[in-house]
Amino acid sequence: MTPRPGLTFASSATQPALARAYRMALANLLDVNTVPYQPSDSASGLVSGGSIIQAGAGYAGQAWTRDGAVNAWNAGSLLHPRAAASTLWAAVTRQPDSSLIVTQDTQWWDQVIWATAAWNHYLATGDQPFLASAYQTVTSTLARRRSQNFNAARDLFEGPAFFNDGISGYPAPPADPAESQGSFVGSYPAARVMMTLSTNCLYYDAYRCAALMATALGRPASEAAALSQAAGALKTAVNQHLWNPGAGLYGYFIHGDGPLAGQLDPTEEGAGLSFAILFGIASKAQAQSVMRQAHVQPYGITGTYPSYPRYSDTRPGRHNKLVWPVVQGFWADAAATAGDVARFESEVRSLAGLASASGQFAEIYNARTGAVDGGWQTVSGGFPASPWTSEPDQTWSATAYLRMIHAGLFGLRLTTDGITFAPTLPPAFGDATLSGIGYRGASLTIARHGAGNAISAFSIDGAPAEPAGLPASLTGHHTIDITLTG
């Protein structure tokens, strides 16, 4: 069995729910969904053997680019780095000229999240050979996507939203009221040329990560500068075209063609709002506005909000007004990043409660009742839509909770030099301890005291330390104590 950390709370009111959910999430990732790899997983020639992280118990060894990248980024690279690396390489193809590229398929819009996961993997492991191949993969992929999907008139990339591959996740247009072309969003021409928030945030971060990779590899300064410039232009374009000042939120997408071409759709996209904050696209004031204005349902943030006219609370669209834990994980981390302790606490408690009540980390839950619910969406075209299944033991639902704990509650921030800390400890949680968490050559016990998100005291093995961080060269077991105020 892969070694795993433990989570304990001093409060007897907090321990049963939050710590149990943590154990469930670890079991989902490490026991249920880390599976032997197959030779067919190695189109890159870089899957080194052992295991990969599959998308969920219902997917029989499938990792996929988007799911694999999210799971590596959320938790896999820290908790099981070898399986995470193999999972990332399973989504890469070696081309005839021997160069590497993220595997090209009909969902081009979800390819670049691989860059974010790959850079995070390097930060977690310090693996220089991995980084060299990852840089080639990322730059090849970005060049391909820029040549085919970049809208130079608006400096944004075209394509649907990061994980909303079902047409139920979109208003009409780009859908039509009867979803006449079936469930796949790529079957709708207008969806192929719209410019969505989450996807453009991910392109921004892909360029940012590529620039950081170039610097870490000692590449010519001109390469890093060009990549940074591309990232900066995207950040400007996202804020220019997708920020809705009247709502105090980012909109969902810019229409790419038809009578609405150039107009901003005001739908709230949970993942996109989260990414804008996590990647630093939103200013501090914008981030705080998003936290105030976004609509959160009784059981958490939803994929998109509000319900589209062809759906309802009794028949919610599959990618519409339902709770996807993968989005909850990003939203909770965004709340911690924005300094909103109450929003963070609410989302953590919500996902822990959903997992506890259902006995698993399911793919999707009903936003009003908390029941496992796959939502509604047409299959072959035409209404009424059909009910869909919420897949069992979905990996990115479990790693979303792990992200809440590691990145949010304990504030682990990986850098090229080591770990910095930016924890968020809600007062009602009480003191918390994360024990046996591995980082490169070290094993850490991290104890949090007090409440809030301002560090008032930081020590390593009992000795006060400034600033609050650990070097990447650290080895052996160490105990970190952090006292919070605020």
Image (tube, rainbow, N blue to C red):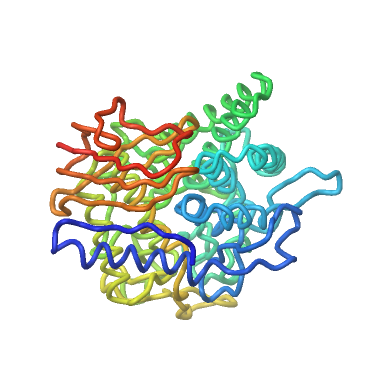
Left or right? Give the position of 130 relative to 66. Answer: right
Percent across and percent down for residue 438 are: 43, 49
State the residue at coordinates (45%, 60%). Answer: 3
Q: Is residue 91 left or right of residue 247?
A: right
| Viewer-nearest residue: 42 or 479 | 479
Q: Is residue 185 above or below residue 234?
A: below
Instruction: Pick the residue in front: 39 or 231.
Output: 39
| Residue 355 seen in the current view | yes
Measured from the top left, where is residue 262 in percent x and y? 51, 41
Pinpoint residue 237: horizontal percent, then vertical percent: 50, 32
Q: Residue at x 68, y 50 (%)?
A: 102
Residue that lies at the very extreme toward the top in this rendered image = 221
Instruction: Work out whether residue 308 can be spotted.
Output: no
The percent coordinates of residue 454 (x first, y second) are: 21, 34
Q: Residue at x 17, y 54 (%)?
A: 429
Residue name at image x 71 percent, y 38 percent: 136
Q: Quadrant of the C terminus?
A: top left
The answer to whether residue 293 is above or below residue 455 is below
Rendering quarter of residue 138:
top right
| Residue 181, quarter of picture | bottom right
Residue 133: image quadrant is: top right
On screen, residue 219 above or below 338: above
